[in-house]
Image (tube, helix red, strand yellow):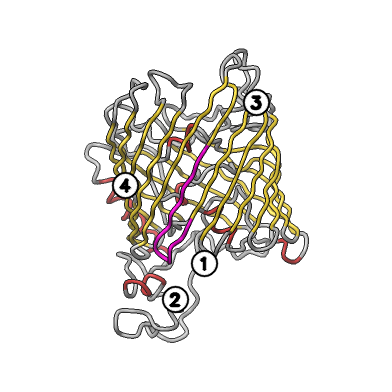
Amino acid sequence: MRTSSIAIALLSCALVAGSTHGQTLKHPQSIQPVSLNYDNYYYYHHAEGEETSPSDEAPQPEPEAKAAKSAGNSCCNGSNSCGTTCGDCRACGNCGCVRGCNCFLFGDGVPFSVFRNDNCLGLEIGFWSQVGYHTQGTNGFGDGLTNDYPNRVQLHQQWTYLERKANGDCGLDWGVRADLMYGTDGQDFQAFGGRPNDWDNSWDHGGAYGWALPQVYAELAFGDLSVKMGKFFRVLGYEQLPSPNNFFYSHAFSFYLSEPFTHSGVIADYALGDCVTVVGGWSLGFDTGFSRNGGDCFLGGLKLQLTDNLLFSYMTAIGDFGFEDRFNSDANGYAHTLLMTYNLGERWTFAVQSDLVDNDVLLGSTTNVLSVSEYVMYKLNDCWGVGGRFEWYKNPALGAGAAGEVSSMTAGLNWRPHANVVLRPEVRWDDYHSASLWRDSTLFGIDCIVTY
């Protein structure tokens, strides 16, 4: 069964790659699959009571379903819908409760993983592969963000992670995590904010490809307190580095230009009851390894679950962001993300994010970078979802010849032909304002993510 599931997942992604005329994938990829959660991992999963922290963003393959309480498809009532025991058997999962039993093109709707992860140490090992293609647009370089290698079928992320989660419910507990990735996203996720050749900053692999080691940390948990020490994902922003945790193939301007990707330091969260979580810590600046490049930065914030479906978060970074050189001896600044997410029933998800970055840039000058992003996602069933994103981004320091001020809109679909496979086609429109020399652009992109 496990071998046939892997074969089906490989076939699904091969269909996407094969449909792109004249392009071949030049880099090896171990492809197999997982279901994508529409919810933002950091804000929603923590609010649901899981012992997570700001850096726990990578998805976990779901465990295989337990044996059915009765034989065959007895959990289905015969009318193409599920009975009261929906989800108890493999042939009738959550999808059946919405659109009849099993909407997947392949498989029985149960995600699989290469490793069963049932060892005594509680260690989990997981993988995913992301293969994508996007057009070059009017300006010739895609969106100029993470999708800047146009007209090629490319391996964005070949990701491996090892994790032991710390659970403080029964007293003091420990955890560890390490993430290693390769692909065209690799150079973007390296520690480029540190000193030259620091950490993984020199791990380029020719052209657009590279390796990155974005997370390596140890964790201690006791009760409602969790503390992580090492290198971990950022606390700012709604979109995330791991591709399976995002609805859209492309990223917002604020994700790439305003927010850090990683921090090195210490971060802690403490749950003050069920509705309030405080976050606090310190880092060596933005996107660094473990050598200090002038960075000295406070990280912190507050998460409020206002209702069962409404969540608000304020996350900030204050201090020296690093990036110091002979032109920029003072990188002091302030950055924040205001985020509100709302779930309307089991189908609609809304999110509104606002970023502000106020920092010294060149020879003591100061700039304010502003952005507002709005997200709307609708879940048709466990196999199909549709979404839209609108963003306004302004960076006065960029001036002519760069993005400057831009309005961007993205419309996309999520389709899961298998529980471990998601395909994300999208169309993106970037409207650059008059101060920029970049021209308005329309882009098409599609990717396939397989988790295993």
Left/right of residue 62 with respect to residue 136 in the rendered view:
right
Q: Which mark is residue 411?
A: 4
Amino acid on which the number 2 mark rests in the picture:
Gly
Q: How many discs appear?
A: 4
**Looking at the image, which is closer to me, 56 or 421?**
56
Q: Mark 2 — residue? A: 87
Which portion, as a residue range, is magenta? 342-355
Residue 187 visible at all: no
- Of labels 3 and 4, earlier in sequence is 3
Seen at 39% across and 63% down, the residue is 347
Q: Where does label 3 land, which residue?
A: 332
Residue 135 in the image: x percent, y percent? 28, 35
**Can I make out residue 147 in this image?**
yes
In which quadrant of the rendered view does residue 420 lie?
bottom left
Which residue corresponds to mark 1? 63
Observer-nearest residue: 166 or 273?
273
Tag nearer the camera, 2 or 4:
4
- The amino acid type found where label 3 is placed reads Asn
- Disc 4 marks which amino acid? Ala
- Among numbered discs 1 and 3, the one appearing first in the sequence: 1
Q: Is residue 371 above or below residue 329?
A: below
Q: How far apart are marks 1 and 3 (CA)?
A: 45 Å
Answer above or below: position of 340 versus 327: below
Foreground: disc 1 or disc 3: 3
Residue 53 is situated, as x and y percent measured from the top left of the image, at: 63, 52
Q: Is residue 352 magenta?
A: yes
Under circle 4, the secondary element is strand
Using the image, determine if residue 141 lies above or below residue 363.
below
Q: Which of marks 1 and 4 is in front?
A: 4
